[in-house]
Image (cartoon, helix red, strand yellow):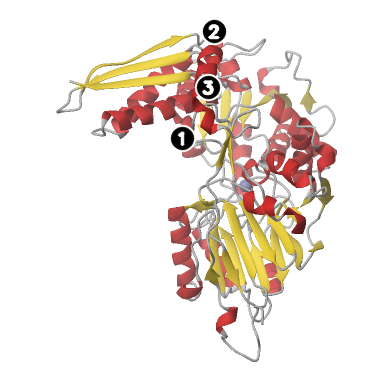
């Protein structure tokens, strides 16, 4: 007698790192993919632009794929689609399900790559239900740092699964119904969920995340007090926050000039979907210098991470066509600071102060809130869902472990909590009411599948094996940066350097600070890794500097650090 089918989850990415979120559900003849994210390289090889999950298993089984379901539009959930879709198109156009704003971002992405006809985009709205083979997906709205995010209630032959997507609980969201625990409770029903998959990103943060209403009121306070110009920088996909800036501007009789392509694109997209409202005349044409008095103007600009070609950096460092920083300006940095960018942002903030501006950033004011649930919120979802099985998702390994501990504290049987990593499948059998606790129903780990992520260069080639060729090409195209530092072999005091030299690595005037910044980064690495062996220091310096050059100026020179002990 053949074994009755089991539901198997295949995590392709997102378990063990922040990014790459992608998980397949497999039952009998039905295969469905939840999210298809990328990750920006942290410690990458030459020429690597992005990292994507390994989809070998999905591609091998593409005939059975019933659809791709997207929780929301962040890159770490949709960014790998342009790489996956061409592989799937060979067995028909895959259906991609997502909310209106998510699909608008996907459409933009696929169009850029000439792939729009290769997939069928199916819009879903909160409350909708879609059947994909043996799975029935229900779409629940959530609060997150992007609009139109969804959690997924999945009815499967082995029971109900809730996949939270990225979320937070905001008891008083500014718009929309927000994350609704009652809905989760109803979906879970009397007996509770069979399985909960929940976002682990912020499990280390105790308490409750700041609500968007609190951020709005902090912004309002700043707008009300500012006498000069206001510059606001944030992530271009944070439409909700952009709406708050528009509202604050209107309330204070200011007009908004939007500067930066990604902001302009996303604002246009959100407006056309009715997700963002600006009354006529609120937005100024960004191509013209404003004739307005300072206290009538808001500049909404890209560059919250200090990227030097962004609008904010150009304005600050004197590289913008017609805008500079004036004494009395207030700059609001309303976003998370990505760790690798700390030193660029610090320099930017210092320069802003030097120019007489005052700067508000996350650390010193409530002008930003995380989009991910803190510990108390995660606990509330566990209580609402009452899952039999629990698998923490979206997080580095330590986040998964801590989330697993939290689940155990909230009544989940520790034997039914599974910490998976990418490539480690997990399966669940059907419960048979006549055979209570039958072993065939129990969750178990399955044989791992290959899941080491793929490093992709901008041309869409996963060609890390050709590193040497790439290096030669880069030497020609992007130039070289060398860094020398001499350390005392015993005390590890720096005796010489760090000294930096570049060849064929040309800087525009406005990015001349990039080399100076890299010295600061090198010093940070040396301080952090004090005592490490020279080859380890060299590796660390190389990755930190390459990351810096790529993020700041989009260039990828060959970096040759030399650490000598004497
Ligand atoms: Zn997200």
Between the C-alphas of marks 2 and 1, the distance is 28 Å
Quadrant in which the N terminus appears: bottom right
Instruction: Name the residue nearer the viewer: 207 or 228.
Output: 207
Side of 528 relative to 232 (left or right):
left
Does label 3 point to a residue whose CB lies under 8 Å from ligand 1? no
Q: Are marks 1 and 3 in contact (CB under 8 Å)?
A: no
Closer to viewer: mark 1 or mark 3: 3
Q: Position of residue 48 (x, y in %)?
A: 55, 30
Residue at 63%, 48% (x, y): give it.
Answer: 55
Give the residue drawn at x 63%, y 12%.
Answer: 320
Residue nearer the viewer, 97 or 128: 97
Residue in the image at 68% along x and 72% along y: 160
**Number of marks drawn:** 3
Q: Which residue is mark 1?
A: 43
Residue at 62%, 54% in the rendered image:
167
Return the x and y of residue 164 as percentages of the image width and height.
Answer: 63, 60
Viewer-side label of 2, 3: 3
Q: Distance between the Cα atoms at labels 2 and 3?
A: 31 Å
Please tell me whether mark 1 sits on a helix, a strand or a loop.
loop
Q: Which residue is mark 3?
A: 469
The secondary structure type at the circle numbered 3 is helix
| Quadrant position of residue 373 | bottom right
Decide if residue 299 is in sight here.
yes
Numbered label attached to residue 79: none
If the image is split into quadrants, where does the C terminus sit? top left
Foreground residue among 389 and 334 = 389
């Amino acid at each position: 007698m053949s074994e009755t089918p089991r539901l198997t989850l295949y995590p392709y990415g997102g378990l063990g790192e922040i990014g790459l979120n992608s998980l397949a559900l497999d039952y009998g003849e039905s295969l469905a993919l939840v999210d298809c994210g990328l990750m920006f390289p942290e410690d990458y090889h030459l020429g690597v632009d992005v990292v994507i999950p390994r989809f070998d298993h999905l591609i091998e089984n593409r005939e059975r794929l019933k659809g791709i379901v997207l929780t929301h539009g962040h890159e770490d959930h949709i960014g790998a689609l342009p790489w996956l879709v061409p592989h799937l198109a060979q067995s028909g156009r895959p259906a991609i399900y997502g909310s209106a704003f998510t699909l608008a971002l996907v459409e933009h992405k696929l169009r850029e790559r000439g792939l729009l006809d290769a997939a069928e985009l199916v819009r879903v709205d909160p409350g909708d239900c879609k059947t994909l083979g043996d799975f029935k997906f229900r779409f629940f709205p959530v609060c997150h740092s992007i609009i139109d995010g969804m959690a997924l209630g999945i009815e499967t032959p082995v029971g109900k699964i809730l996949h939270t997507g990225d979320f937070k609980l905001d008891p008083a969201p500014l718009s929309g119904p927000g994350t609704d625990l009652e809905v989760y409770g109803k979906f879970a029903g009397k007996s509770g969920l069979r399985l909960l998959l929940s976002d682990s990103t912020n499990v280390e943060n105790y308490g409750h995340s700041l609500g968007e209403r609190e951020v709005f009121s902090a912004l309002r306070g700043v707008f009300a007090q500012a006498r000069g110009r206001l510059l606001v920088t944030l992530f271009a996909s944070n439409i909700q926050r952009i709406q708050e800036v528009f509202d604050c501007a209107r309330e204070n009789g200011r007009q908004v000039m939007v500067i930066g392509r990604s902001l302009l694109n996303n604002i246009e997209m959100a407006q056309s979907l009715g997700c963002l409202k600006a009354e006529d005349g609120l937005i100024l044409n960004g191509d013209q210098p404003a004739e307005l008095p300072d206290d009538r103007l808001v500049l909404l600009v890209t560059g919250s991470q200090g990227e030097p070609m962004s609008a904010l950096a150009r304005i600050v460092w004197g590289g913008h066509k017609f805008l500079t920083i004036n004494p009395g300006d207030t700059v609001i940095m309303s976003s998370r600071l990505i760790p690798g960018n700390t030193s660029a942002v610090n320099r930017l903030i210092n320069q802003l102060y030097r120019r007489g501006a005052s700067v508000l950033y996350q650390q010193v004011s409530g002008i930003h809130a995380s989009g991910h649930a803190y510990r108390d919120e995660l606990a509330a979802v566990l209580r609402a869902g009452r899952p039999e099985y629990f698998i923490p998702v979206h997080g580095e390994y330590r986040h998964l472990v801590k989330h697993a501990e939290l689940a155990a504290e909230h009544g989940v049987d520790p034997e039914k909590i599974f910490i998976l990593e990418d490539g480690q499948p997990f399966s669940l059998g059907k419960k048979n009411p006549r055979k209570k606790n039958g072993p065939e129903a129990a969750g178990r780990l399955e044989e791992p599948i290959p899941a080491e992520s793929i490093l992709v260069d901008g041309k869409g080639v996963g060609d890390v094996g050709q590193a040497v060729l790439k290096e030669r090409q880069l030497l020609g195209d992007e130039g070289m940066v060398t860094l020398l530092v001499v350390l005392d072999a015993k005390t590890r005091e720096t005796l010489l350097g760090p000294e930096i030299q570049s060849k064929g690595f040309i800087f525009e005037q406005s990015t001349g600070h990039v080399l100076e910044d890299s010295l600061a980064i090198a010093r940070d690495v040396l301080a952090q890794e004090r005592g490490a062996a020279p080859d380890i220091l060299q590796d660390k310096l190389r990755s930190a500097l390459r990351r810096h050059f790529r993020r700041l100026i989009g260039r990828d020179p060959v970096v040759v650090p030399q650490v000598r002990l004497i």
